[in-house]
């Protein structure tokens, strides 16, 4: 056996659980409670579920394999030999071996799926669940219908004539089509196996892949968790989940009263109903399997309060065996099985390293000079760099850069995940030099002063610079500059206001700010690139701000604290609507105080300088919309994390919002000019096209968002024909990868960025 951390146990478990260091207040409370128990009861305590269950170092794989083999053995006796289900009679016809395995699968799913839902957004959750079920199901159906069934038909009929047609009992094409959405609407193919197997002779029907019957109930449970996720229940009202489990358990107890004695199966009558997606649904399985799923989900939701104790695990095993043999399984053993499976998942040893793991280790050591470190007793690899790859300074960085190339816009090759750290002083890469040439044409208004602004990064003070973008700014810009004065050693204000037009930046005289006025509006992306090109050489992190984003004094230093984690490349506050006193994000309640995000807007974004140099420039052909989101997706492709800290708020304005009434509903719409609709649709579709395959969950939500924005522009804007034309032109230019210059604001210019490996297209 292994310890909770996954290492091999070298001696007895400490008797005093108070010596442990739980990570949460609830875990400490449970540990303190256990400490008051007699000493003999504390010997098997391993910590709470939150402490002992690791994402990889657990026994889930072994349990799944054992359950799958149990299903195979149980079904083989019925299908191949015409025997009763294995262990059914020994367990007083309450539950057989195959049924126990199915129950175990639903318990594991309830715990793991709920854990996944709490750590991801709704779009990514749905995408993961689709990948979990449908690819495997479709492969199984295709192999059965067009690989196995033709062989059986040739064996039974001596020919394949008539096999490919529909037939009275359904053909192979109908088998795939009718069962592809998890509901088993056609169990067999023609009359195959109906007379050649014991099960076929018993039922007088053809049957293939009988084990697929439970998939529709699994998918139904996934949809329930998805509904709880999008409604915020999993994060803000988790007590509702055990309440639902209790209601289902109450129904099970009512069924148990109808049984004659303590043995026998479920005798209560349940109805069946047909659905479009799931086929025929038996309410009995919704109640019984749904209870197990929700019970395990409840343990996961309260994992910091659930003790993992060997004594409780052994007691649960004895109770399950006793109720199976003596009776009372559904009333007593059924809920106890939930704890038994969860305890076994925590206490069983993780799988040993596979041959593939060992081959990957040899490859990393030989070619990348990276030694995978595998903790004792585990199969998980951890990377430790060797040699020059770990050296600080230009030598180590040059060697790392040669192995892990910069990911430029449109480049197809993905660099490996690497540690992110501040870049050492040195010559800037090509994109920085290109930006420096543009910066030479800008006119600095004031001189830079090397201030004392810093955060904390890996044990030392990190020098932070601020890049503020502006266009016809008002007095709030002065407050923005002042808000980062103490936290940033350098402040750069890039003012896109056209030359000759008065701007409030003319009055900025502080020695902590440098004003850059290109004299023409070339868009947000150009302004960001221009500011980056003028950063001081010793800058280690950059915070981007809009002209209305006045930060609290502690926001930048607290964001810098997150960069102490080398895996985090971007830290950002949460956009805050100061008018309505709420977060702009609709489902922000689904996320914790600090959570990983797929994208980030530029305003408030704190990013490592080394990451800017590695990823490349912002796309200037995007002009304004989606320049930040596309850049975020490129950042994530390097392996860097993007985190958002909801405890830090970013006052931000997203335009004029009005409330409209449509079909009896109140709809809040952000109104904007037609040219913004054009760039939003064009840039959004191009981003989805280029980055969607790397972030499919984000791509799904982005498609829905763009569709809603396009409908709102056409339905609710004042000049609907102009907005409709802008949307259609945006779609067209996204397909052709061109741009229409008339959708630039008055006096603006566009400097398209050349895509890697492709020539620049002409303008229209």
Image (cartoon, rainbow, N blue to C red):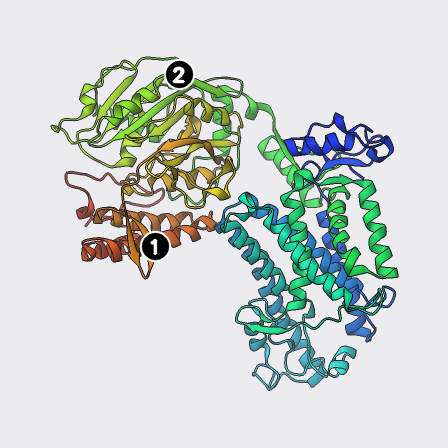
| Location of residue 214 (image quadrant) | bottom right
Instruction: Report whether 763 appears left or right of 449.
Output: left
x, y percentage for residue 634? Answer: 42, 40
Reading the chain from its start, which is encountered first: label 2 or label 1?
Answer: 2
Within-10-Å neighbours for mark 2: few <14, some 14–19, many 20+: some
x, y percentage for residue 165? Answer: 56, 83
Instruction: Report whether 634 appears left or right of 657.
Output: right
- Image quarter hosting the N terminus: top right
Which of the two residues, 357 or 297, is positioned nearer the viewer here? Answer: 297
Residue under label 1: 708
Which of the two residues, 760 or 213, is positioned nearer the viewer here? Answer: 213
| Location of residue 37 (image quadrant) | top right
Q: The residue tagged with tag 2: helix, strand or loop?
A: loop
Q: Residue at x 80, y 60 (%)?
A: 329
Q: The residue tagged with tag 1: helix, strand or loop?
A: helix
Which of the two residues, 171 or 251, is positioned nearer the viewer here? Answer: 251
Residue under label 2: 453
| Location of residue 407 (image quadrant) | top left
Q: Residue at x 77, y 42 (%)?
A: 347
Image mark count: 2
Within-10-Å neighbours for mark 1: few <14, some 14–19, many 20+: few
Q: Measured along the vertical axis of the image, is residue 257 above or below residue 202?
A: above
Q: Measured along the vertical axis of the image, is residue 49 above or below residue 164?
A: above
Residue 336, numbered circle: none
**Mark toward the viewer: 2 or 1:** 1
Q: Is residue 639 visible?
A: no
x, y percentage for residue 412? Answer: 43, 45
Instruction: Report whether 568 appears left or right of 39.
Output: left
> Gap in Å between the C-alphas at discs 2 and 1?
42 Å
């Amino acid at each position: 056996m292994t310890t909770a951390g996954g290492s091999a146990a070298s001696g007895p478990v400490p008797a005093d659980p108070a010596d442990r260091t739980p990570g949460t207040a609830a875990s400490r409370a449970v540990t303190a409670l256990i400490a008051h128990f007699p000493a003999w009861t504390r010997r098997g305590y391993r910590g709470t579920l939150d402490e002992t269950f690791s994402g990889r170092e657990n026994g889930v794989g072994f349990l799944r394999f054992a359950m799958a083999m149990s299903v195979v053995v149980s079904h083989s006796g019925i299908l191949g030999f015409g025997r009763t289900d294995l262990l059914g009679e020994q367990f007083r016809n309450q539950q057989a071996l195959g049924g126990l395995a199915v129950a175990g699968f639903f318990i594991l799913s309830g715990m793991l799926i709920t854990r996944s839902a709490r750590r991801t957004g709704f779009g990514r959750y749905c995408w993961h669940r689709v990948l979990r079920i449908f690819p495997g199901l479709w492969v199984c159906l295709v192999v059965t219908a067009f690989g196995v069934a033709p062989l059986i038909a040739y064996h039974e009929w001596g020919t394949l004539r008539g096999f490919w047609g529909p037939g009275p009992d359904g053909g192979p094409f109908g088998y795939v089509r009718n069962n592809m959405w998890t509901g088993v609407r056609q169990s067999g193919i023609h009359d195959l196996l109906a007379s050649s197997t014991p099960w076929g002779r018993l039922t007088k029907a053809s049957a293939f892949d009988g084990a697929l019957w439970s998939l529709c109930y699994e998918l139904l449970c996934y949809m329930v968790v998805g509904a709880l996720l999008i409604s915020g229940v999993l994060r803000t009202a988790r007590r509702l989940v055990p309440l639902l489990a209790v209601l289902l358990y109450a129904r099970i107890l009512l069924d148990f009263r109808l049984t004659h004695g303590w043995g026998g199966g479920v005798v209560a009558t349940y109805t069946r109903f047909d659905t479009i997606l799931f086929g025929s649904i038996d309410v009995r399985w919704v109640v019984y399997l749904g209870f197990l799923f929700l019970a395990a989900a409840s343990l996961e939701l309260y994992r910091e309060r659930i003790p993992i104790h060997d004594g409780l695990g052994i007691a649960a095993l004895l109770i399950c065996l006793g109720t199976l043999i003596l009776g009372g399984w559904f009333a007593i053993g059924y809920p106890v099985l939930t704890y038994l499976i969860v305890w076994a998942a925590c206490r069983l040893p993780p799988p040993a390293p596979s041959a593939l793991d060992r081959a990957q280790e040899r490859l990393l050591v030989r070619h990348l000079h990276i030694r995978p470190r595998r903790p004792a007793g585990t199969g998980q690899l951890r990377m430790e760099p060797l040699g020059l790859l770990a050296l600080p300074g230009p030598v180590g960085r040059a060697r790392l850069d040669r192995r892990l190339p910069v990911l430029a816009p449109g480049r197809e090759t993905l660099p490996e995940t690497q540690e992110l750290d501040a870049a050492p002083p040195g010559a800037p890469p090509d994109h920085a030099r290109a930006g420096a040439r543009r910066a030479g044409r800008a006119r600095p208004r004031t001189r830079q002063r090397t201030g004392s602004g810093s955060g904390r990064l890996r044990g030392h003070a990190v020098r932070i610079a601020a890049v503020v973008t502006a266009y016809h700014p008002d007095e709030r810009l002065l407050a923005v500059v002042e808000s980062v004065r103490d936290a940033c050693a350098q402040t750069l204000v890039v003012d896109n206001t056209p030359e000759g037009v008065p701007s409030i930046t003319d009055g900025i005289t502080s020695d902590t700010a440098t004003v850059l006025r290109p004299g023409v509006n070339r868009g947000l992306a150009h302004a960001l690139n221009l500011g980056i090109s003028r950063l001081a050489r010793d800058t280690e992190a950059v915070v981007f701000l809009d002209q209305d984003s006045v930060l609290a004094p502690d926001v930048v230093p607290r964001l810098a604290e997150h960069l102490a984690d080398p895996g985090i490349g971007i830290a950002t506050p949460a956009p805050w609507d100061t008018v309505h006193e709420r977060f702009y994000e609709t489902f922000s309640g689904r996320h914790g105080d600090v959570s990983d995000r797929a994208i980030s807007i530029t305003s408030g974004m704190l990013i490592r300088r080394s990451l800017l140099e590695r990823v490349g420039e912002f796309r200037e052909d995007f002009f304004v919309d989606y320049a930040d989101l596309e850049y975020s997706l490129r950042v994530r492709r390097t392996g860097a994390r993007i985190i958002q800290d909801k405890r830090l708020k970013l006052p931000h304005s997203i335009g004029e919002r009005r409330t409209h009434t449509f079909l009896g509903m109140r709809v809040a719409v952000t109104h904007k000019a037609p040219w913004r609709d054009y760039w939003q649709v064009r840039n959004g579709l191009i981003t989805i096209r280029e980055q969607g395959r790397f972030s499919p969950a984000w791509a799904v939500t982005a498609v829905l968002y763009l569709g809603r924005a396009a409908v709102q522009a056409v339905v609710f804007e004042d000049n609907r024909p102009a907005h409709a034309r802008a949307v259609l032109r945006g779609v067209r230019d996204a397909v052709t990868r061109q741009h229409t210059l008339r959708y630039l604001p008055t006096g603006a210019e566009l400097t398209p960025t050349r895509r890697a490996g492709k020539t620049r297209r002409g303008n229209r």
